[in-house]
């Protein structure tokens, strides 16, 4: 894992380069800290990434020195990642983890300059492997990526050329056969199997869940915080309209079911009984839970079989319909869900796999952003500008009529994706400009541009009622690709 000879060689060769980034004292301090982090000298595994992922010159020095303890010479990329992750826990904000992966990629390239032609190529492969791990082993991901798709998504990503096909096949099979895991502190392992220190504060069931998903997937796990704020509760009837990636839900699974809904933190919990803070979440509750990060709620204008129906499209492009008890309740749910998504959704993880030949949607992290509300607004505005530009450029080059069906479908899918993202970020920006967190803290049924509803639902109220309408109304617009017909009004 570590190599004293390689460490001495790197220290000598890179001494002048390191000095350009700081003083002698800074370099020595970075080396001391890196050694302590590597040896876990008064540090926990969960502390390491925090020091390596900061965006300042000293942290970069520390990361460079820390990576020198690893000798990846002659090792395959996936084996090097497994070796690297045995030393610490890859936790933190998305940008911090991205910086750690950049440091790893640079070190791997130093040790294996002939495996991949550039450092950028190594980093592209590293991110691709991470996202492949998420796709193959993540929680409730649906259809898994095939080896053929993995290779196709990386076409032209190696400085305009393709990566060796044998290399990509080996990486795919390695990750498919054994998922990437990172180290966890012993006390965290014990805590996950015990009542934990927060039991007396959070009730006897607080031990139950910390993440809804697999611990090996830091990008898509749904965070469950027992102390998260509750923004709205009430009865909702749910219909699963489309599964992940907008694929049509099988007929037998599309029926309406009534739940007591709780929007808590960034998760919409759907429970059979009224919400009780001290009650543990059941397996069924977790199965029904929906993360609203990067989601968009809107009035289901093209669904007329029931009144007061809203449509929720999630980050993984599932589509769910919810029937509220009144038009005011429906709009209140729409506003609260979109406010939570706008305020707390972390910036997208940088796209690691994709090419001009085949469109792939980027994966969106379920972690909560650490940006301030002003920074979040600027982030959304920048993303809106980027998406708007991409959409305009995309539509300026429509597909040739002679193109094959798959190429036309790919064009339409990307067009739909960009259009949806443009609408989503327009709504996020508008909500943050209107007050963001102040809107969340308003009365339960208050929302921007809305009158307060007459009452809040209680257990005594009847579940949402159905309305008989014509059965020939088409719902196919909600399947992939789905193009929203009417933009949601924010005000």
Image (cartoon, grey):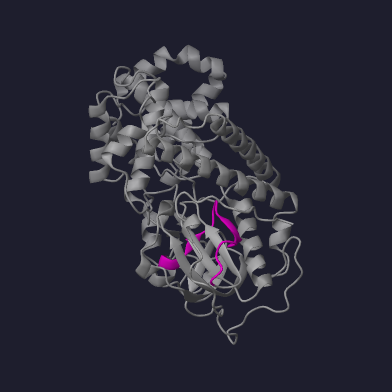
Q: Is residue 219 above or below residue 159?
A: below
Q: Which stretch appears magenta?
A: 287-305
As rendered, which of 322 and 36 lies closer to the eye?
322
The quadrant the N terminus occupies is top left
Residue 488 shows up from this direction: yes
Q: Quadrant of residue 182?
A: top left
Q: Judge whether residue 87 can be spotted in this image.
A: no
Residue at x 35%, y 37% (from the top left corner): 129
Residue 250: x and y in percent read: 36, 63
x then y, percent, for residue 265: 57, 61
**Which residue is rendered at x = 59% and y = 59% of the image?**
297
Whether residue 289 is in magenta: the answer is yes
Q: Camera-side residue: 323 or 40?
A: 323
Q: Position of residue 214 (x, y in %)?
A: 37, 54
Q: Compared to 482, does 66 lie above or below?
A: above
> In the displayed image of the protein, which residue is found farthest to the bottom?
460
Classify 214 as above or below 421: below
Residue placed at 64% from the left, 42% from the top? 380
Query: Which residue is found at the position 47% from the left and 32% from the top?
Result: 399
Residue 476 x %, y %: 46, 58
Taking the magenta stretch, the answer to whether it contains residue 197 is no
Q: How many marks?
A: 0
Q: Is residue 266 left or right of residue 8?
A: right
326 or 394, which lies in front? 394
Residue 4, by quadrant, is top left
Instruction: Give the quadrant of the C terminus.
Output: bottom right
Q: Is residue 339 left or right of residue 363?
A: right
């Amino acid at each position: 894992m570590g190599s004293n000879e390689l460490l001495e060689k790197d220290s000598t060769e890179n001494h002048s380069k390191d000095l350009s980034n700081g003083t002698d004292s800074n370099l020595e301090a970075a080396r001391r800290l890196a050694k302590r982090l590597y040896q876990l000298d008064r540090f926990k595994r969960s502390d390491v990434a925090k020091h390596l992922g900061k965006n300042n010159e000293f942290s970069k020095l520390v990361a460079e020195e820390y990576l020198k303890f690893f000798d990846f010479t002659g090792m395959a990329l996936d084996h090097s990642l497994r070796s690297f992750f045995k030393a610490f826990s890859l936790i933190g904000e998305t940008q911090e983890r991205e910086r750690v992966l950049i440091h790893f990629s640079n070190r791997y390239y130093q040790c294996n300059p002939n495996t991949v032609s550039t450092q950028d190529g190594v980093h592209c492969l590293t991110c691709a492997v991470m996202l492949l791990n998420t796709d193959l082993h993540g929680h409730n991901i649906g259809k898994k990526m095939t080896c053929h798709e993995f290779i196709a998504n990386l076409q032209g990503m190696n400085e305009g050329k393709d990566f060796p096909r044998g290399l990509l096949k080996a990486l795919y099979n390695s990750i498919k056969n054994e998922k990437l895991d990172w180290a966890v502190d012993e006390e965290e392992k014990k805590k996950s199997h015990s009542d934990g220190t927060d039991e007396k504060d959070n009730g006897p069931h607080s031990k139950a869940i910390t993440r809804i998903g697999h611990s090996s997937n830091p990008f898509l796990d749904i965070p469950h915080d027992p102390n998260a704020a509750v923004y709205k509760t009430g009865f909702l009837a749910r219909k699963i309209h489309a599964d992940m990636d907008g694929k049509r839900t099988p007929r037998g699974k599309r029926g309406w079911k009534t739940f007591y809904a709780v929007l808590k933190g960034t998760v919409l919990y759907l429970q059979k009984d009224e919400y009780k803070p001290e009650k543990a979440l059941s397996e069924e509750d977790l199965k029904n839970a929906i993360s609203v990060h990067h989601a968009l709620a809107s009035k289901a204008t093209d669904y007329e079989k029931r009144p007061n129906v809203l449509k929720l499209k999630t980050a993984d492009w599932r589509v769910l319909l919810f029937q509220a008890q009144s038009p005011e309740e429906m709009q209140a749910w729409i506003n609260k869900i979109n406010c939570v998504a706008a305020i707390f959704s972390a910036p997208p993880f940088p796209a690691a796999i994709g090419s001009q030949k085949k469109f792939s949607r980027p994966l969106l992290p379920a972690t909560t952003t650490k940006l301030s509300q002003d920074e979040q607004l600027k982030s959304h505005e920048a993303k809106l500008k980027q998406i708007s530009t991409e959409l305009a450029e995309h539509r300026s080059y429509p597909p040739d009529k002679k193109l094959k069906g798959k190429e036309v479908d790919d064009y339409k899918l990307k067009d739909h994706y960009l259009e949806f993202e443009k609408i989503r970020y327009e709504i996020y920006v508008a909500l943050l400009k209107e007050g963001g967190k102040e809107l969340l803290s308003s009365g339960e049924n208050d929302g921007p541009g809305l009158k307060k509803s007459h009452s809040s639902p209680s257990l005594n109220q009847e579940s949402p009622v159905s309305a008989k309408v014509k059965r020939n109304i088409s719902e196919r617009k909600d399947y992939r690709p789905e193009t929203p017909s009417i933009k949601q009004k924010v005000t």
